[in-house]
Every structure is written in C-alpha cells, then in structure tokens.
Amino acid sequence: MADAGVVETLLRRIEKVDDGVDSLEVANSLGVDHQVIVGAVKSLQSVGDVISAELRSSKHWELTEEGMEIAENGSHEARVFSSIPLEGLAQSELMKLSFGKIGFSKAMSSKWIRVDKTHEGGPRIFRTVESIEDQVREKLLLVQKGNTSQLEEKEKNELKKRKLLSEVTVKTYWITKGNSFSTTITKQETELTPEMIATGNWKEKKFKPYNFEAMGVAPDSGHLHPLMKVRTQFRQIFLEMGFTEMPTNNFIESSFWNFDSLFQPQQHPARDQHDTFFLSDPALAHEFPQDYLERVKKVHSEGGFGSQGCRSLHFTTHSDDNLIQYPFTPVKYFSIDRVFRNETLDATHLAEFHQIEGVVADYGLTLGDLMGILHQFFTKLGITKLRFKPAYNPYTEPSMEVFSYHEGLKKWVEVGNSGVFRPEMLLPMGLPEDVSVIAWGLSLERPTMIKYGINNIRELVGHKVNLQMVLRQPHMSTGLL
C-alpha cells in the first residue's frame, strides 16, 4: 500500500475539482517524485472504483547533465572567451582547461577569437570582440524554467545535437473521481473465511472483485531427464557428421549374432553366465543365413582369411534363410540404445545403461581415418585433448582406447574405445576384401566406454542393405551351443 499521507492528499485534491488532476502536476506541487504519486494511483485502483485514471503520454525537453552544467556556469565558448586576457593567452595553456578544446572550436566559429601562429612564444589566442552574448546559456535557462515554447525547432535541434538537450516522453495519469469515490478508504477483503460465514458479518464486508483474466500460478511440469538431454546432443552430433541412425530396441539377441559373428571365442569370459543374461525360453535360436553361419563356423574352428581362427568347438544349426547379396555402398551409421549385462552395481558399473556407437564402412579406411573422425566427434562434444592407447578387442585389430585430459580432475580419463574390424569378422559376410569398417563407442552414464559389440550384423549380409550394423552388446542372449 502506498504512503497513507500521499493517498489522503491525492484524494483531497481530486475532491476539490470537477474535471480531474494531472499526476505530474500534483507531484510537482507536493515536491515529491512522480513515481510516488503513480504508486498512490495504483494503490487506489486496487481497492475498487474509487478513482478513474487515464494514462497519457506527452513529450517535453529536458537539459542533459552537461546542459545543466552550462546553464549554471556558461557555455564552453563563452568561458574560453572569458579566460583570454587582453594581452592574449598561449594556445597550449588554453587547451589545458577542461572546456578549452570544445570552447576554442565554437569560439573560433563565432569569430570571437583569433590565433596568431607567428607569435614569438608559440601560437597565441587573442579576443576579436570586446564582449559577447552567451545565447547557448540563455536558451538552456529558458528550457530549465519551462519556457521551451519560446525556442524555435531549429534551436532545439541544435542544442540536442550538442547533447545539451534531450526530448523525453513522460507518461502521466489524468485522475478523476470514480463511481465509489470517497476520501476514506476501506480495505477490501480478498478471501471469504469460515468465521465470516459463521458470524454473518460477510454481509457488511466489501470484497475485492475477482480478476478472472489474471494469470494463475504456473503449474509444476515435467522436464527432460539429463540423460535424455545428453542423448539428444549426441544424436545431433552424429547427424551433423552425416551419419544415419539405425533401428534400436532389439533387446534380446542370439549368441550367434552377439558373439560368434563378432569372432568372439566360444570360451571367452563374456559368454559366461557371470557376464551375460541368458533366457530359458526360448533356449535355442535356429534361424540364420546358413551359408554365412558355415563361413563363421569355419573361421572360428579352422581359421581363414590369413587367420588361425579361435580353435573353437564346432557348432551346428539349421536355417531356411537364403543369403541375399547387394552391391556394397559406403555407409556411416550410429545407434544409441539401452543395453544390459550381469554386473554387480557400484559407482562405475551398472547392469543397465545406454550405449552409443558409431561405425563407418568404406574402401581403404585406415587407423588414421578412425583417429580423424574421433577428433571431430569429441571436439563437437567440447573434448579437445585426446590420446590413443593400444588395446585388445576380439573383433577389432588394431584397437584403441581413447583418453581425454579432464581439467577438473587434472588427469587423463578414458572416454571411449575404438578399432578396425578384423577381416575374420568382415570377410565371411561377403564384403569386398578392400572394404574396412572402423567403429567406436561410449556410454551416456559414464565417460568410459563399456565393451561394445554388434548384434545386428545380420544386416551386413544383406537383409535390408549391404552394411547396416548396430554397435551394441546387450549381453542378453539365447544359448546356441
């Protein structure tokens, strides 16, 4: 509520007139800031139809800070003229004065002074007239006294150009009596209480009208989970780099696609129930491209393509699928999806997390291509300091762990794993011998990359396109052997 004394004074002013009062004039007459009167108007408007206030806009001229200084002390040019004695003044001495530079230029334009550049002691300034009239100051004093109408528009604009005058828009209220005008203000009730109803005194109360147009309290609403925000950022980076997103949500996979086709030895620890979830129903998977399965079987047990193989036990399966071949075309794919593993939970290990992978297949790709793409990818994430360390993966050779320098921890931390897929894994698919596949992966939940794999390699052998792969290893498999 505004100051009670100001509110009461304003109401008394309104009571004495019939046509209303101007808020700015009231403020000037009371010697208070205009905003104090505006506050009183707002306060009276909130208690009902006591007053009627019409907002009006008007423009007027005001002196700037420099203009007020000139109105008090005189213009720069007039002060320069006053500073020059009859015997003249060295120009160097005049320029030391705060008003010297501007005043000298204006006084020269008005032909009040002259410069003798041939003077023995250096350039010297002399008066050229006996007296002057400081019209600039006189015009500013007129504005200061509220007599701006005596100045022509050209004169106002000249003073405005010199930044001595500014045109200001003033918003005021024209205040008149309302339908419920009174010089005594009764506070309106904003809430009907049980006590009012019980005693019946609500009948004597005045209630503030409801504003059905008012905005209500903003309701609590949901928001994106931080992981989903990061996922969106990763996805956008992949798309900016020209990658295509692969189908996901394929949570259950056979051991053949999850391990065997990745050239992962059958005695590898990841196949053990300590690391992998296995289903009892169905216990076996049967439908595989038979020709491809035989080639994978052979490279595991006997070797091939320059490899000795894994010397694994033979396995058999049945399939009615026919291998469909398509001409190879270079591709770039990525996937972001939930994966699962049989893991004891701690600060850095989860049984369920989001795996992120990128894969590029083309002719003649090298480790240099992989490092270049990794630099581009991580730079877009804001990770610029990278190091690569040789590593081992069953299905990539060479393989590299990716490290970045963490400014907060002041040490190098692992941020991903990568490699070039082995020929033993690619050539059984029927890919051309000079095709290379490079890949890398990491996790949303932590900066280090969990071991990655492929569980959609069936696409590599021609189900939809010649090279469609999902670099995920959900570790949820059906037994094959």
Image (cartoon, grey):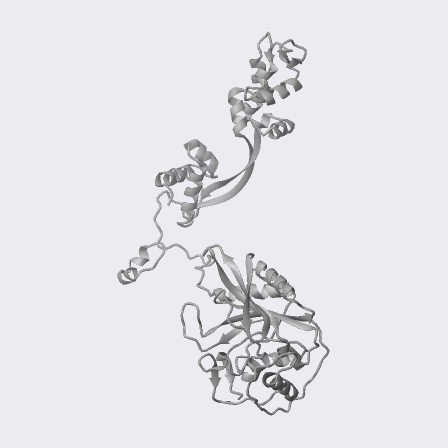
Q: Nearer the viewer, residue 429 or 143?
A: 429
- Residue 40, image x, y percentages: 41, 42
Is 134 in front, or is 439? Answer: 439
Q: Image point 44% across, 63% down: which residue?
A: 219
Left or right position of 46 against 339? left
Question: Which residue is more in the foreground, 474 or 175?
Answer: 474
Instruction: Look at the image and tell me whether residue 348 can be seen.
Output: yes
Residue 349, horizontal then vertical, whole percent: 44, 71
- Residue 374 appears in which quarter of the rendering? bottom right
Closest to the observer: 70 or 312? Answer: 312
Q: Is residue 183 left or right of residue 319?
A: left
Q: Position of residue 184 (x, y in %)?
A: 35, 44
Provide residue 190's location: percent of width, then percent of height: 36, 55
Q: How many marks overall?
A: 0
- Quadrant location, the N terminus: top left
Residue 276 sits above or below residue 136 on the image: below
Instruction: Tell whether 129 sits left or right of 2.
Output: right
Image height of 360 relative to 252, above or below: above
> Furthest-top residue in view?
87
Question: Which residue is the extreme one toward the left?
Answer: 199
Q: Judge whether residue 382 can be spotted in this image.
A: no
Residue ID at (27%, 63%): 198
